[in-house]
């Protein structure tokens, strides 16, 4: 076997710089010329210059059969691209370093990767022909994919809504056809105010004056601050509930009106509804009475203001049936009872109660009243106009050796599937996420609670988190946690502007003071973000019969009510109505 030898050429050493030795050096010219490749141009360079590719081994051949001979200057697919450097055009070895047009003629080899082939019925065998049609074809394919995605999304939404149990219709659409009060044809609409006009209103009021403090308060039990979902506490039931009378029926307000203490009279709940009107979604109404030069803001019997809205600002629809335990009306009744019971359970049960100037007005003699205090305060709206409001407080507590007033409210969880957050799992570790979710679903209710706390000048507002024992049991509840917030700090957290709140009240008062004497009703439109003012007859709402729900202890209770665990008999069991117990079947424990 004969082996051919491979001779490595002599590499000349250049002691003066980089690259082959200069051709002027006669001692190495012959050696350099012998080792240089033929037809390869050479240009002088320095270390700071960037070098391009010498060869591009990734170049694709569009048509190998039609490829020109290798080494041709016109070959666009050659590995070496020297089309710009022709030896016969003055780029020989001898003068390669001194040509002034060399930089202009030099170009880099395209280093972009070849385009990916499009596989398809018309693309597979025609990749390189009709290239001008590729962008148009690509756009058509993208549009087709978008149309298919829209069809799939609509199909999924349609199946999702069909699988819902009678709640596929949107709640907002249902509320658009239901007003809080039936508009009679003889009513005359005077004003229509959109909520967009409320956003720019601003009015600054001076510090109010305390006129009177009525009722009595019990101390707050601080052990409830340590309640966690793992150490929950059963919600009890109490008989000593407080039934709030409207403005014109309040005996103290009537007395203050006779003494000409102010020209405008209202309650904190009514003012809070006006102040937070732009956040409301459900329909509500107020009765306005102009008597002489005085203005009374009232609520009618059976008004939505007597209940608490649940899931009002949420986008998740609620069942529409009034008999459903998760309907808006049923949840409002449930939330009202939860708040009344929660406000009494978190107090210290030692029989001590701090009493104030006068007892609660309109209270029945011999009836045990709840821990509640009415603070009558007066604000100056202008030089000749004052506003008196009855503000409510629920408890006191000693903070830093000073007596502080509290407001007590409770949020209720009825079904985690609607809220999206399970309180039992998230409340202990992610309280901020739970509160943010409640601000999204119940923003109007939290804003009204904050406005009431600011009006009453409460030092702290306690918010309880109450959940059902079971999502289908709306009678039994447990307290999972209690959080405390300062009203001013919480107002800033939920973006509640005090100046804007008073600006809304001032604009409504100024508008109503221009009306003649009579009775009017202000109604929140059920489908549009606006309020309307109607002129109504003097005897409107006086003969209406409203079927109010029975108190919770008089309602028929499920059998699970009496199956209390050992040692967990609550005051609610002892306070159950005796008549309801007599109706239990025989043999039931």
Image: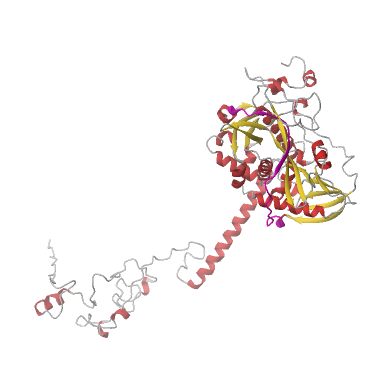
The mark total stands at 0
The answer to whether residue 78 is left or right of residue 279 is left
Residue found 47% across the figure and 72% down from its top: 129
Outermost residue toward the top in this view? 587
- Residue placed most toward the observer, 31 or 7: 31
Q: What segment is highlighted magenta in the picture?
A: 196-223
List x then y, in percent, for residue 204.
67, 52
Residue 209 visible at all: yes
**Does 27 appear above or below 524?**
below
**Does 133 appear above or below 425?**
below
- Residue placed most toward the observer, 385 or 556: 385
**Does 279 appear above or below 547?**
below
The answer to whether residue 79 is left or right of residue 521 is left
List x then y, in percent, for residue 570.
67, 21
The quadrant in which the C terminus is found is top right
Asked if residue 556 is among those painted magenta in the image, a careful observer would answer: no
**Does 408 appear above or below 366?**
below
């Amino acid at each position: 076997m004969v082996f051919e030898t491979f001779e490595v050429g002599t590499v000349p050493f250049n002691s003066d710089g980089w690259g082959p030795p200069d051709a002027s050096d006669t001692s190495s010219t012959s050696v350099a010329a012998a080792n240089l490749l033929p037809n390869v141009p050479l240009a002088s360079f320095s270390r700071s210059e960037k070098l391009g590719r010498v060869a591009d081994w990734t170049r694709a051949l569009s048509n190998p059969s039609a490829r020109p001979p290798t080494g041709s200057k016109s070959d666009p697919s050659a590995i070496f691209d020297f089309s710009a450097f022709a030896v016969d055009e003055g780029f020989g070895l001898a003068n390669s370093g001194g040509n002034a047009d060399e930089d202009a003629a030099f170009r880099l080899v395209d280093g972009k990767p070849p385009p990916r082939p499009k596989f398809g019925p018309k693309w597979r065998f025609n990749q390189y022909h009709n290239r001008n049609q590729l962008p148009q074809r690509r756009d058509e394919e993208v549009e087709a994919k978008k149309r298919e995605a829209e069809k799939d999304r609509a199909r999924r939404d349609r199946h999702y809504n069909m699988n819902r149990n009678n709640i596929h219709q949107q709640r907002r659409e249902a509320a658009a056809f239901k007003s809080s009060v039936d508009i009679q044809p003889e009513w005359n609409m005077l004003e229509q105010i959109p909520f967009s006009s409320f956003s720019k209103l601003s009015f600054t009021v001076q510090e109010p004056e305390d006129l009177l403090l009525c009722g009595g308060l019990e101390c707050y039990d601080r052990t409830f601050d340590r309640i966690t979902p793992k150490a929950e506490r059963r919600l009890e039931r109490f008989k000593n509930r407080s039934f709030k009378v409207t403005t014109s029926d309040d005996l103290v307000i009537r007395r203050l009106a006779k003494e000409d203490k102010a020209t405008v009279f209202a309650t904190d709940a009514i003012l809070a509804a006006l102040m937070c009107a732009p956040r409301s979604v459900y329909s509500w109404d107020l009765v306005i009475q102009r008597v002489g030069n005085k203005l009374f803001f009232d609520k009618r019997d059976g008004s939505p203001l007597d209940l608490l809205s649940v899931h009002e600002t949420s986008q998740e629809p609620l069942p529409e049936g009034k008999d459903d335990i998760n309907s808006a009306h049923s949840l409002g009744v449930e939330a009202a009872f939860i708040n009344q019971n929660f406000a009494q359970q978190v107090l210290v049960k030692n029989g001590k109660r701090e009493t104030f100037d006068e007892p609660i007005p309109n209270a029945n003699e011999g009836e045990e009243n709840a821990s509640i205090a009415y603070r009558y305060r007066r604000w100056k709206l202008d030089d000749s106009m004052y506003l008196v409001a009855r503000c409510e407080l629920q408890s006191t507590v000693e903070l830093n050796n000073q007596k502080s007033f509290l407001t007590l409210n409770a949020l209720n969880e009825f079904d985690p599937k609607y809220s999206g957050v399970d309180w039992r799992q998230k409340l202990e570790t992610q309280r901020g996420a739970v509160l943010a979710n409640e601000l999204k679903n119940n923003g109007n209710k939290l804003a009204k609670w904050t406005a009431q706390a600011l009006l009453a000048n409460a030092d702290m507002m306690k918010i309880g988190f109450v959940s059902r024992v079971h999502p289908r049991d709306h009678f039994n509840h447990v307290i999972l946690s209690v959080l405390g917030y300062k009203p001013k700090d919480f107002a800033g957290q939920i973006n509640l502007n005090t100046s804007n709140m008073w600006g809304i009240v001032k604009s409504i008062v100024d508008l109503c003071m221009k009306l003649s004497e009579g009775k009017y009703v202000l109604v929140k439109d059920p489908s549009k973000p606006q309020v309307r003012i109607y002129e109504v007859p003097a005897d409107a709402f006086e003969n209406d019969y409203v079927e109010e729900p029975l108190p919770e202890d008089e309602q028929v209770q499920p059998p699970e009510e009496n199956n209390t665990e050992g040692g967990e008999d609550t005051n609610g069991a002892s306070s159950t109505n005796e008549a309801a117990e007599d109706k239990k079947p025989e043999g039931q424990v």
